[in-house]
Image (cartoon, helix red, strand yellow):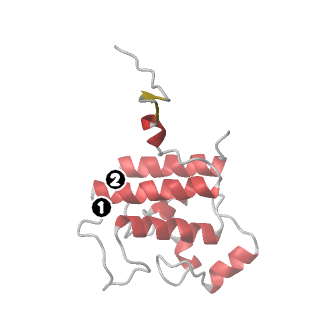
Amino acid sequence: MKTPKRLEQALIKLYNAYHNNRLNPEDCTACAVGNILDNYDSWKHLSDQHGSLKLSYVGRVHQNLGRKFNGYSPLELLQIEKVFLDACGFKTPLCHYNQKPKDTTSNDVLFNGLSAVVEVLCQLDDMENVMDYSKLFEQENGVPIYHIDTFLA
């Protein structure tokens, strides 16, 4: 099955952001959606509260007109961001007194958020989760079902 272009582009952007330390849940240009949307913050006007699934007036207009932003509808973008924030350990919608992780940019926190976002992105495009490695451990009668070819140097 061919990977949809929007999924491929989103995965590349998120991968690069993670490895280049440009993924930050508290910066709307560097969060999951901020990176998917080329580090612009205009998407924050789609909702009145960061981490909410409720569209603002502007968001509803864009949604009703069928607008897409790098392939994603306003509702899909809000869903992606909420999953990212929740998986990073934030209580959503964000508020200065709500729970948040001690170190919001630690690799563990960001990897948890990234993993959850990849799962949602794959679901949105009816694809298997590209980060699901559970098949590697499946066995039948004690023998692995799938094998990994390794190359020795």
Is mark 1 in CB contact (under 8 Å) with mark 2?
A: yes
The percent coordinates of residue 91 (x first, y second) are 38, 77
Query: How many neighbours does mark 1 have within 10 angstroms: few (below 14), some (14-19), or many (20 or more)?
Result: some
* Residue type for callout 1: Thr
Q: Which residue lies furthest to the top in this view?
A: 153
**Front tag of 1 and 2:** 1
Residue 73 is left or right of residue 86, and the answer is right
Mark 2 highlights which residue? Answer: 21
Between residue 41 and residue 117, name the one nearer to us. Answer: 117
Q: Which residue is drawn at 36% across and 48% down?
A: 20
Between residue 106 and residue 128, name the one nearer to us. Answer: 128
**Above or below for 39 versus 4:** below
Looking at the rendering, in which quadrant would you find the N terminus?
top right
Cα distance in 3D space between marks 1 and 2: 9 Å
Residue 130 is left or right of residue 96, and the answer is right
Figure quadrant of residue 28? bottom left
Sequence-wise, the earlier of marks 1 and 2 is 2
Q: Residue at x 31, y 78 (%)?
A: 99
Residue 53 is left or right of residue 14, and the answer is right
Residue 76 is left or right of residue 147, and the answer is right
Label 2 residue SS: loop
* Residue type for callout 2: Asn
Mark 1 highlights which residue? Answer: 105
